[in-house]
Amino acid sequence: MVKRELWVVAVAAALVVGCNRQAPVEGQAEPVSTAAVPTEKGGQDIFGAYTVAAWPKPLTALPDHGDWTWGAGQYVFPESPNRVFVLQRGELPQIHKRPAPVKIAPSIEFPIGRLPVRDATSASPPGSLFGPDGKTPGDDLDVGQPGVDYRWEHIVTVFDAEGNLIEDWTQWDKMFRRPHAIYISPYDPQKHVWIVDDYRHAIFKFSNDGKQLLQTLGEPNVPGDDDKHFFRPTFMAWLPDGTFFVADGYQNTRVVKFDRDGKFLTTWGQRGEQGKETRPGYFNNVHGVAVDPETRRVFVNDRNNGRVQVFDENGQFLDQWSFGPRPTSDVHLFIITSDRFLWAADRGTSKLLKYSLDGKFLYSWGAWGDFPGAFWGVHGLSVDQDGNVYTAAVDSGGAQKFVPRPGANPAFLLGRQVNPGWGTK
């Protein structure tokens, strides 16, 4: 009898311990965390493995800018955590008060209170590419009155780690029409600054301090598809020997290869069937290019066909994969980080997407909106030497900075930018 009572007590104690351990429901395995920071209780990975920094400081801090804010954010590139370039398409008037909704139909009102009021890329200059003659540049009045609807100012700005404006390159404002991307080659010890302008069909190379324009590739305002012209180029990427590639682009459907001095070497690509193309080497909107410095493979964003195509450095096709069905997906660009993963910015899903270099999908994060930390039209993506991630967005406007969360799983973080030539803080 005593043995029976002891057995009952033991069983009861085991049940209590089991309850306190919160054993999984019968038939379920012990849960495995897939959170970016698995030690945290509660919350959710709205911004992946990052927190959103209050960066940069608003333009309202500038003289005579109390009513102005960011235009379409084109690109952001950190030379270091304390010197970060932001490229935008002018400034827009601040919206201090949401307009009252208008009843369009009994069941339709606009604007809806929780949705953005303005799309910065539609409101920002430029307007038409060409004037009425179809040859000379447009005058941009089709997007409104300068000084009222927009300001063509502070196209290139530079910020420190705290978001303070430390440089502006306003001396070059009038030279640009539709600046598209800004870079420093990771293999250039002189750290020249390159700016792609797709409406001027040209790429401009500046001294690091912005005081000198040193080189121009393409003939400004003159489109073409030969060895001396572009037709709306978009992005660039470099190999360790200084060789670089230009995605050309919105109108042309090719990749152009140059040597380290800007001498034309070769080009490849043909126009495909819009939205349906699967053939290698055919493109519709070449809107992004990245290189793997170890294998010298060139990854090309065939945007309007929703895929990446992979080539050797001379244009020999190697591989391809899809980003998912269009128009749900709409990848603007991608970068290859130093840990050799490809990260893509998807305008369609408002997420950053992580892939292995053979195309396996690994992870994504991001939330749509125009609130701090949200993504809406990410068009620029980069990482500094401290692992901070920067994005620029054409639809929401301006740029943002994301700081790694303490204890974050490294698999959820973007690797550092490839910058072996000058990667000091």
Image: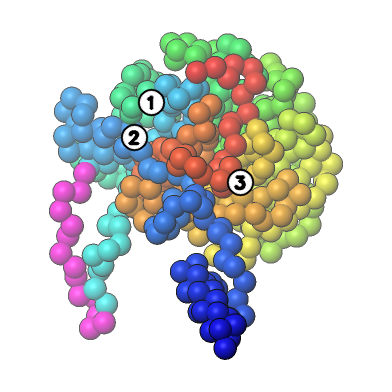
Q: Residues within 10 Å of mark 3 (few under 14, many from 20)?
A: few
Q: Which residue is mark 2?
A: 55
Q: Say if the magenta span includes residue 225.
A: no
Residue at the (62%, 32%) spot, across then down = 236
The residue closer to the viewer here, 249 or 392, is 392
Q: Which residue is mark 1?
A: 161
Is disc 3 placed on a helix, strand or loop?
helix
Which residues lie in the magenta part? 94-107
The quarter holding residue 294 reads top right
- Label located before the other in sequence (1 or 3): 1
Give the side of residue 71 with respect to residue 200, left or right: left
Which residue does the image show at 17% across and 60% down from the upper left?
Answer: 99
Q: Residue at x 51, y 79 (%)?
A: 9
Mark 1 residue type: Ala
> Which quarter of the picture shows residue 403?
top left
Lateral position of residue 208 relative to residue 90, left or right: right
